[in-house]
Amino acid sequence: MPHDYKGEQITVHFDGRKCIHSRLCVLGLPHVFTSEKIWIKPDEASAEAVVEIAHKCPSGAITYTMASGEAEAPPVVNTIRVRENGPLELHGDLRIDGGDPVTRAVLCRCGLSKRKPFCDNAHIKGEFVASGEREPKESEPLETRNGPLEITSRKNRSYKVEGNVEIIAGSGRQIDRRTMVGLCRCGKSKNKPFCDGSHKAAGFEADGAE
């Protein structure tokens, strides 16, 4: 369950189930994100500094609510970044498997995570190899680049992504622009990051929508 750490100007929310230990928080603000039992101390830095660190958390494990009630707004462009030998990094107006809206998430694409659909860094031990770069596909500019982005983990199959989204390489270079796409989550597709049906031959099993 997420934990709340309340300060005078800002409350920091932490969901350990989503954390991938990027360590941007503990390195960026070590007096706020500590190694102590109560490890988040929002008042040890300005609210603005804490917000800046929260925005850098790729997994969305760290979020916040200001004392005024203001929280992080979705970006003006929904993106899915393909990490080299790693997961899918999402930033947008996200609805993942029917959950509450979030702005950031890191989803498994190696098929090995025990916290599916979220990444748990199993790709490292599993020595998953998959480029974060590929040739861009021809696509028309999206009329709208933001708005709700629905991500559905389909049982024993791919992620179904519905909504305006730009798929980008780890370098930030654009790969494709879509309003609907199936993305590999079994780790076996020969057309990564896109699904090509390889989950069937691989006997991939994972909970999800029918």
Image (spheres, rainbow, N blue to C red):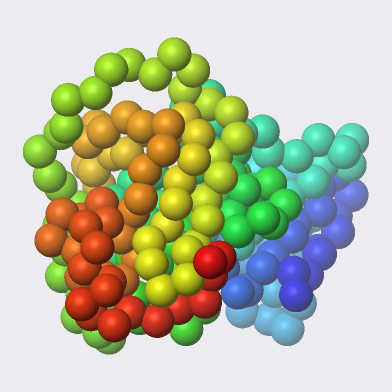
Residue at 72 percent of width and 52 percent of height: 100
Residue at 15 percent of width and 54 percent of height: 191
Which quadrant does the N terminus fall into?
bottom right
Q: Nearer the viewer, residue 86 or 22?
A: 86
Quarter assignment of residue 157 = bottom left
Q: Position of residue 193 (x, y in %)?
A: 25, 53
Residue at 52 percent of width and 56 percent of height: 152
On the rendered structure, is 125 left or right of 13? left
Q: Nearer the viewer, residue 30 or 66?
A: 66
Q: Nearer the viewer, residue 41 or 83?
A: 83
Q: From this viewpoint, which residue is outermost toward the left?
A: 135
Quarter assignment of residue 178 = top left
Asked if residue 133 shows in the view, the reply is: yes
On the rendered structure, is 52 left or right of 66? left
On the rendered structure, is 162 left or right of 170? right
Q: Nearer the viewer, residue 50 or 137?
A: 137
Q: Position of residue 77 (x, y in %)?
A: 47, 27
Asked if residue 84 shows in the view, the reply is: no
Name above or below for residue 85 compared with residue 64: below
Q: Position of residue 55 (x, y in %)?
A: 56, 44
